[in-house]
Image (cartoon, grey):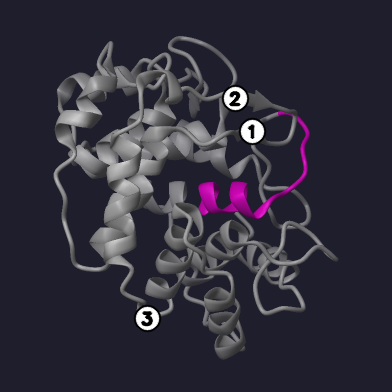
Amino acid sequence: MDLEGVKRFVLSRRAFDGGFAFCQPLPSSLPETYYAVYVLKALGEDVEEKEELVQFLHSKLGSDVYSIFYVLKTLSMLREKLPDLSDLLDRRLEEAMGREHGDLSYEVGITATYSFENPNVLREIYMIVESLRLLGRDVNVKDFVERFRKNGGYGVGRANLKDTFYAVSVVGGDGKVVRFVLEHECDEGGFAKHPHSYPPYLEDTYHALSIFDMLGYDYKSHKTVRYVESLQNPDGGFRRSIYLGISTLEDTFYAVASLKMLGEI
């Protein structure tokens, strides 16, 4: 893997407002800024003009769960003081857990270069709980999350790796979860969206490896390492699949985090 290329790609996404953007000349977004800061930190790089970046983060802090999550996560990586939003997060958690079952579904879309989804309740619960943990609080949502246990994994609809990642992050897991995840492993390396299917995708590989990491499952695979490294584009960033696609900060985050969990970084 070309580590210098990764750094150049990430820094090329630095925007005029201090954060990081999907591409130039778009303004910064909170997710892209989180992905960029994580990658730079993972590669041992300092974030230049840190004060401007911190100012950008505070300017984007709203009352919604998603802005709170990304701002707190990024400020924590920068070792900055976190605003205490515990009361607001408690209210958001109560609202999320009080919804009727019919309001919990979500839709997924896939293109050749990236995946996208509307928010779902497991993702929301994960973001709230993780934000509260950063603020030194731990909450018990196990009974609520276990409603979504299916076939060894978790899902708002069908069980899948992403929802299982959210659930395990919040309540932990067991051997059945590990077996569920292993069913998504591809023979050529990486992990796919459905059990015993193809092709692998970078986001699914990241979620699978994260679940193994949280559960203490010792997963080693040279094939998966080679799969992730094969997704680096000439510009230094990473695409999401073995097929042609543009580099994104999100996919570069998935790649670097995956290789770190695999012991390659």
Tell me which corner region of the image, top left, top right, bottom left or bottom right, holds residue 78: bottom left
The answer to whether residue 256 is seen in the rendering is yes
Q: Position of residue 99 (x, y in %)?
A: 35, 30
Q: Amino acid at mark 2?
A: Val
What element does badge 3 sit on? loop
Relative to 65, is 101 above or below? Answer: above
- Between 28 and 90, the one nearer to me in the picture: 90
The residue that mark 1 highlights is 115
What element does badge 1 sit on? strand
Frontmost of labels 1 and 2 is 2
Q: Position of residue 83 (x, y in %)?
A: 36, 77
**Magenta span of residues:** 243-256
Measured in 3D between alpha carbons, the distance from the residue under mark 1 to the one under mark 3, in whole angstroms, is 31 Å
The residue that mark 2 highlights is 108
Q: Earlier in the sequence, mark 3 or mark 2?
A: 3
Side of 117 where 71 appears, left or right: left
Q: Is residue 250 magenta?
A: yes
Q: Which mark is residue 37?
A: none
Q: Is residue 21 magenta?
A: no
Q: Residues within 10 Å of mark 3 (few under 14, many from 20)?
A: few
Q: Amino acid at mark 3?
A: Arg
Q: Amino acid at mark 1?
A: Ser
Q: Residues within 10 Å of mark 2 (few under 14, many from 20)?
A: few
The residue that mark 3 highlights is 79
